[in-house]
Amino acid sequence: MTVLVVGATGTVGPHVVRALAALGVPARALARDADRARAILPAGTDIRHGDPGDDDDLLAAAGGAEALFLLTSHDHRMADLQLRIIRALRRTGIRIVKLSGTSSAINPDGPQACRQHWEIEHVLAASGQPYAVLRPNAFMQTLIDQIMLPAVKATGAIPNAIGAAGISFINARDVGECAAQVLTSRQWDGQSLVLTGPRAVGFAEIAGLVSAKTGQSVGTREITPADIRIQLEQRGMARWEAEHFQEMYQLFRDGRSEFVSGDVERLLGRPPGTVEDHLAAHPDLAVAPLDAS
């Protein structure tokens, strides 16, 4: 079989392509920037230059593929693009495996992007197209690598907008491997699979783990979800997106992403990776000294 991957160059997509290759399944990537895709994806990946929002490009890339991994950028018009893709593929028989959002936020009045995921999921389920949905919790590579660790390097502390709550962080590599399993088996058709780490971990605990790894004192700096929105807007982020992140952090603060699912182990036959494992393998955890004043 052949799998078409839409969203192959982001946080999760390269892991999907690598996991498919490990299973001996050819992956085909549809990318607007083919040069970037070639630099990121494994050698030998079939890369098709094109726009997933263009019906002709999409249908040409989907020819001969039995399954499609559906992931597009976090955007105000994400639902418009994904629904267009679903409409274009209607009646082709291709199985669609959609990467959605944090399970507890997928509802019609959730944070903005999660409202879009809710709409897409419902249209997909009613479409008659074979499908499955993956709902990963917060990615280690996003909240830890892209937000926490840069703050630690700059200030010696992790900004904590979720208080004493925890999050059952998941490694994007595990999400990619789960996606490969679902893409290559009809066993999961019609199901929504919830992907989490093995336990909820708080920001203060992560600060302690970074301290132990680096031998330097790392603390937390207490802020609120509203502070997150203000900071993001000051950096030029659009209001809708800043408000989305404020609502997501409030959801985290309320403990609504502490849940743990067994779906990763069901799919992979092993437990999901831990935050400890992720930090232990991290190549660079140098931090700035705390302000002694």
Image (cartoon, helix red, strand yellow):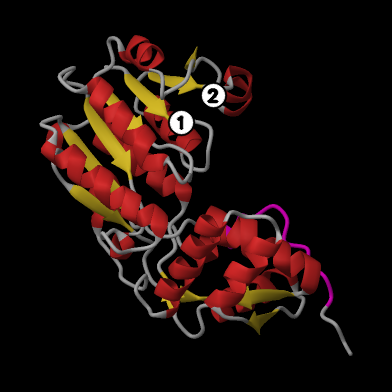
Q: Quadrant of residue 33?
A: top right
Q: Is residue 287 magenta?
A: yes
Work out whether residue 242 or residue 142 is closer to the camera in this orientation and state it.
242
Picture layout, residue 112 above or below residue 45: below
Give residue 227's position: percent from left, percent from top: 61, 75
Q: Is residue 276 magenta?
A: no
Q: Which mark is residue 18?
A: 1
Cα distance between the residues tagged 1 and 2 = 7 Å
* Residue extent of the magenta highlight: 278-289
Q: Is residue 210 left or right of residue 30?
A: right
Q: Where does the C terminus fall, quadrant-wise?
A: bottom right
Please say whether residue 292 is visible from this viewpoint.
yes
Q: Which mark is residue 42?
A: 2
- Mark 1 vs 2: CB contact within 8 A: yes
Q: Is residue 219 left or right of residue 263?
A: right
Q: Residue at x 30, y 39 (%)?
A: 98
Q: Is residue 46 left or right of residue 228?
A: left
- Residue most extreme to the front: 239
Q: Secondary structure at mark 1?
A: helix
Neighbours of disc 1 within 10 Å: few (<14), some (14-19), many (20+) = many
Q: Residue at x 64, y 62 (%)?
A: 233
Give residue 161's position: percent from left, percent from top: 55, 77
Q: Amino acid at mark 2?
A: Pro
Q: Is residue 239 left or right of residue 285?
A: left
- Residue most extreme to the bottom: 293
Q: Residue at x 20, y 49 (%)?
A: 192
Q: Amino acid at mark 1?
A: Arg
Q: Quadrant of residue 288?
A: bottom right
Give residue 218's position: percent from left, percent from top: 71, 78
Q: Secondary structure at mark 2?
A: loop
